[in-house]
Image: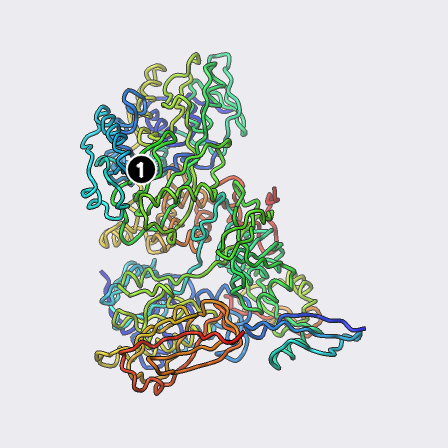
Amino acid sequence: MNRQHVDILIIGAGPAGLAAAIAAREDGIESLLVLERESNPGGILRQCIHNGFGLHRFKEELTGPEYAQRDIDRAKELEIDIECDTTVLAVSPDRVVTCISREKGLRFIEASAIILAMGCRERPRGALCTPGTRCAGIYSAGTAQRFVNLEGYMPGKRVVILGSGDIGLIMARRMTLQGAKVLACVEIMPFSSGLNRNIVQCLNDYDIPLYLSHTVTDIQGRERLESVTVSQVDAQRRPVPGTEMVFECDTLLLSVGLIPENELSEGAGVQISPATSGAVVTDTFETSVPGVFACGNVLHVHDLVDHVSNESFQAGHAAARFVRDSHEEKTFLRVEDGEGVRGTVPQKIQVHPQEAVTLMFRPSGVFRNASAVISCGGKELLRRKAMIFTPGEMAAYTLKPDAFDGLDGSEPVVVRIEKGAE
Amino acid sequence: MKNTDILIIGGGVIGCALARELSRYEAKIAVVDQAWDVAEGASKANSGIVHAGYDAVPGTLKAKYNVAGANVFPTLCEELGVPYRRCGALVVGFSEEDRPTLQELLDRGVANGVPELRIIEREELLSLEPNLNPQACCALLVPTSGIVSPYELTFALADDAALNGVTFHFGEEVSAIERDAEGGFVVRTNKGEWRCRILVNCAGSSSARLHNQLSSRLMHITHRRGQYYLLDRPKEAPFERTIFQCPSKMGKGVLVSPTVHGNVLLGPSAEDIDDPLNTETTQSGLDSVMEKVRLTWPKVSLRTNITNFSGVRAHEERGDFILGAVDGCPGAYEAVGIESPGLSSAPAIGKALAEQIAGEQRLPAKAELAPYQKPAIPFREMTPEEQEKALAENPLYGSIICRCEVVTEAEIVAATHRPVPATHIDAVKRRTRAGMGRCQGGFCSPRVAAIISRETGIPLQDITKNGGNSYLLTGTLTKEAEGREQA
Amino acid sequence: MSMEQVITCINCPVGCRITVTLNDANEVISVKGNTCPRGEKYAHQECTLPLRMITAVIPVENSAIPLSVKTAEPVPKRLISQVMEELRAVQISVPISLGQVVLPNVCDTGVNIVATRPLQ
């Protein structure tokens, strides 16, 4: 059997894997390998041909392929070894990666550190338990996006979109521009999780109605989709009888959420957080398995690729440090979600962190004129007011190392949203 | 006009089991089916249980063929390379009122010759199945109950039949059957006419309609729809065995069962419907499944649901299978009213019916049979050594197409070249499991479509989900494909 | 005569509903409802000359993979369908480099359509 050793092995050459690899190489890690299951690096950005990427990181507005190309070019300059068409089958707790490709067959690679950067996947129809027929014409928005943008085929002509996340909104515009008729965008929540900009520029510009507090309650069509039924839902998200609207359509696109793809992580014994569906990590993005790091959408689903890159640079640096330095036992401060907060990352912070720590989380609802408060025991570490918190926008607050002075881990760090006066 | 000696109407598990048995005799045999693959009716959408045979009333055909069929399953599945596992079953009583029913089942089972049956009490029951509702008080333990992949069994039967000369004709719906001057049959379909000497009606839900064209002794089939939930493979199976509740007149009730692939199956509901092709699921049907499942498994969660589906079983009003020669219609045979335990009985029904036909129609046995080629072991189930060997022989094993179920390009290519080839997405999915996993084909379906197109020469934009008008794509960026008009 | 237009600000998640009053000459008389200066600027632009970036993919001769393209600068929103129309007529073949002009001066806007990926 094929066995080899590398210092750092990175799974996935999307924006997270590329950034982590660049950081590790810039820190002087020579023995570095990135494995990518697709034929090209770049990840999902390759099919996100719309603009809006890179405003934070590059201070200019790029399309997905352009953003990806910058990292690909940089990785090339740094002579980073990216092996494409290579699928990782398993990761063991002692950091042996089993991978397979047509070119090189089955291989076992031992790594001193592993960075998990596999990204996420879309929730499929089954997750919604929507009744009806199982006809052709029901796609996740990302699958449709791949057909149109990477393969040049149209998946449908008359389209209903379920879910108003950004991918769904972007696909409403894409399908319209390529000649399809988008009849409606349907959202079960009373608010959209998409950006205002996408609601205006992807729906309103093309007079596509957005039905909030509505969902698809029936799917009809023997062979190809023929119609969907859309019903209003009550506060408990139950369909309200008598509110049914039938849309004749040949395509239903689902944009109903993303799930970090952690099957490999679980196989390695990595502890998964029920709140994020990603790994539980420390402030250096190390998981519960020593030497295994996680970053990007496999850790928690981000809104902006800029933040993915930023987080992944940190993970890459941390993995490089792990490879070079001796590992002494550390003690940690526990981080807990308080009121109005879900899925704070990282879940653990070193007592006396060496560097600034960014805490990221999703508000659990829409809060206006409220404050994000980070505290530990009786001590308030940070308080920030904002006009609005919404579940559609990840909140991120950075604390300098000295903010943690005097904290010994006996009390958790709690992140919460304090409601303001309405 | 197409000519054949034997025309089998229906490519379900019964039609395919029969076709395989008949292919051992000298005769030209064709199978027609209105769908675009075999196993597209009740054969693909059922509980996948190989019943031990305790349920059927002694003396009925159901009892006879169930027990005979169940006995051959282990060897047949081994021979054909079909996933089968004798996981055992429990029929659970949730109150003392259920005890007489369990005793009746035990008595029937003993009369039918089912071995190892016994009634167990609460403590033993909960130690065997700790996730069971602790309100359970007793159960019939059925060690010989098994689970099988019903569609993979049908594919294997069909492949073996095809290797031995049986031809399969899909998308062909029989509209009328007439006798011709020579004592044979003229069978009209949407695609033309067949002329045959021997006709076998294995048409499942349509079997009564066809029977009534052949015989004055009319039959009536009720179309009974069963809806299911299929959950993702859990890390630990909640139940080792198939868990039944006590049966009612509508069927064996709602079960919770592992599948041979490690998923968890919940269902079926039971509701009588008018249209046998109406396999949609409904909120009320699915809700009724969950309501009953909670009695068996209080902690059930749909968080890992992969899909819902339904199958329509053919219930003949007499309540038993109707097998053999059609009354007053020489040359015509039938298998009508094949509902549960139809899958378990299929191998025995196929064999008995073939022997009857061969005997009465004086079909000579073939001197030599084509050897059956088992489908290769799925890559995900190989040992690392086997994987290395497979890769050395075929590098396409190195290309993983379905990441959820770890299905390789080699397996998908092989499926498109089986004796009954897979030419659409669902056909590949059922033969290889590509797209059966938690992402439901979101990642792999474009790749599977491209491989089918490459291997079969069908243009990509004409690849369908499951044949007919179930096209995936409506055209390219600049040109609409033909025949994509909204109905 | 003046005319009121209500728009949603896209600059941040607050999504202020901004009311813009315009005169007959389509000049902004007043902007109300915004909570920051960025909102006022956006409202001016959106009500007088709304601009959009357009991204699309176009088929490429001798390539199975289509080419993703964009307007190098935002163009007037009213021209979206005309831009798409002109894009449909573009004929191009590989190799194509990132940033290569695919269609100069689309719809006489002075804006070029450029490739957003390399294609070999």
Q: Quadrant of the N terminus of chain C?
A: bottom right
Q: Tell me which chain the residue with mark 1 is part of.
A: B
Query: Three-letter amino acid code at disc 1?
Result: Gln
Q: Residue A267: where, in percent of width, then height?
A: 28, 60
Q: Which residue is mark 1?
A: B245
Q: Residue A365: where, in percent of width, then height?
A: 48, 67
Q: Residue A412: where, in percent of width, then height?
A: 31, 76
Left or right of B369? Residue A255 is right
Q: Residue at x 76, y 71 (%)?
A: C3
Q: Is residue B334 or residue C22 the one in the foreground?
A: C22
Q: Is residue A96 or residue A407 the one in the foreground?
A: A407
Q: Residue B85: where, in percent of width, then height?
A: 25, 40
Above or below residue B100? Residue A416 is: below
Density class for disc 1 (Cα within 10 Å; few <14, some 14-19, many ≥20) is: many
Q: Is residue B337 or residue C93 the one in the foreground?
A: B337
Look at the image and tell me whether residue A308 can be seen.
Answer: yes
Please count the marks in the image. Answer: 1
* Model colouring: rainbow
Q: Residue at x 32, y 69 (%)?
A: A280
Q: Quadrant of residue B54?
A: top left
Left or right of B84? Residue C118 is right
Above or below residue A242? Residue A176 is: below
Q: Quadrant of residue B62?
A: top left
Look at the image and tell me whether residue A33 can be seen.
Answer: no
SS state under label 1: strand
The outermost residue toward the right is C1
Left or right of B53? Residue A162 is right
